[in-house]
Every structure is written in C-alpha cells, then in structure tokens.
Image (tube, rainbow, N blue to C red):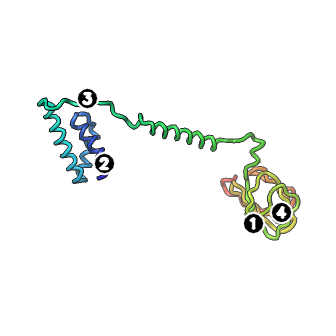
C-alpha cells in the first residue's frame, strides 16, 4: 500500500469518526478494506488511535486540538500556476487553430504536393518543381514527361506534357492547355 492509499484511508477514517463522511465515502472505504489486509490493519490502528484520543480528551488528560483550516488542493500555488498554464496553452492552441492571416497572404499555405514526375522538363513555373515539393497557389508548365500532384483535399491530378496548370486552392485548378486526369474522392466534391 503506497502513501497515497494510506492518506486516503486516513482521511476517510477521520471523516467517519467525526460523522462527516458521505455515503459514497463510506462505500469507498468499505471497498478498500475488502480488497486489502494492509488497509484493514491501518483502519484498525487508526480507529484505536481515535478511540484512545477521544477517551483521553474526555478524561481531561489532553486538551482537544484546535482545528486548523486545511490547505485544499485549489488553494495551492502550484495548482494556480498549473491552471494558469493550462489556460495559456488552451488559448494558444485555439489561436493557432483559428488563425487565418489576412486573405491575400493566405496564399502561403501549401495546397498540394508534387508527388511524382518522370522525364519532366519544366517551362514557366512560379512553383517548385522537385519531387516532394509543397505547392502553394501558382502555376506549373510541363513541357515534356509527366507529373502527379496531390491536393490537400485528396484530389490527385496526373499531368501529361505539354500542359499548363494553375493551382487556385485545394479544391480548384485551371488547365490552360494540355491533358490532365484527375481522381476526385467524395470528400473533394
């Protein structure tokens, strides 16, 4: 039995001895006592101690202890610091999740990935053309070969040269000329 379990039993015994225990706390103590012989030994020891102190107080051998206010977990500085930290972390997460920079600059967000290419020769492009590149809004011109793009919406676009594509967002692309085959999953409709 660890210190925490001993403290729990001591607290419940004290509440029961002073008729302050709720029905739920009595059931909790009963369950603990049924499961552990060490808990039963501690219970008997604490009850004997309570009886001895009560008898000694009644006989005048010792004076009763003045009850000091208990330090509760919600009065602890560490608890207050933890709550403050949780609030700061929560506000930060909400800010990050809902943060939407001014619309014109939201174009800095990746909307697609250049997943594959073969024998690709690129023309006028304002986006990176290496395999695995994250692509923002912009255009790609494929002069020779083929390439595959995957939009963040799940759409896969296979490009076969010659083709020029303009990526507008993760749901829209415009083919200026050439051949493109798109696989559009249900979530992208």
Q: Name the residue under label 1.
A: 116
Q: Mark 4 points at which residue?
A: 179
Q: Mark 2 points at which residue?
A: 5
Nearer to us of marks 2 and 3 is 3
Q: Is mark 4 on a helix, strand or loop?
A: strand
Question: Alpha carbon of mark 4 to alpha carbon of mark 1: how far?
Answer: 16 Å
Circles 2 and 1: CB atoms closer than 8 Å = no
Q: Residue at image x 73%, y 53%? A: 111
Dot 2 or dot 4: first in sequence order is: 2
Q: Is mark 3 on a helix, strand or loop?
A: loop
Nearer to us of marks 2 and 1 is 2
Dot 2 or dot 3: first in sequence order is: 2
Which of the pair 57/38 is nearer the observer?
A: 57
Circles 4 and 3: CB atoms closer than 8 Å = no
Which of the pair 168/82 is nearer the observer?
A: 82
Q: Residue at image x 24%, y 53%? A: 36
Nearer to us of marks 4 and 1 is 1
Q: What element carries label 2?
A: helix
Residue 48 at x, y percent in the picture: 16, 42
């Amino acid at each position: 039995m660890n210190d925490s379990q001993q403290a729990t039993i001591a607290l419940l015994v004290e509440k029961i001895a002073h008729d302050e225990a709720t029905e739920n706390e009595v059931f909790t103590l009963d369950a603990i006592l049924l499961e552990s012989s060490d808990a039963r030994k501690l219970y008997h020891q604490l009850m004997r101690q309570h009886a001895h102190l009560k008898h000694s107080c009644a006989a005048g051998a010792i004076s009763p202890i003045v009850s000091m206010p208990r330090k509760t977990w919600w009065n602890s500085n560490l608890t207050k610091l933890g709550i403050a930290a949780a609030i700061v972390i929560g506000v930060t997460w909400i800010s990050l999740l809902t943060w939407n920079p001014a619309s014109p600059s939201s174009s800095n967000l990746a909307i697609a990935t250049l997943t594959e290419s073969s024998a690709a020769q690129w023309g006028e492009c304002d986006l990176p053309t290496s395999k695995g590149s994250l692509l923002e809004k912009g255009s790609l011109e494929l002069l020779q070969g083929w390439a595959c793009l995957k939009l963040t919406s799940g759409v896969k676009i296979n490009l076969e040269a010659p083709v020029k594509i303009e990526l507008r967002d993760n749901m829209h692309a415009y083919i200026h000329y050439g051949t493109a085959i798109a696989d559009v999953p249900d979530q992208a409709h």
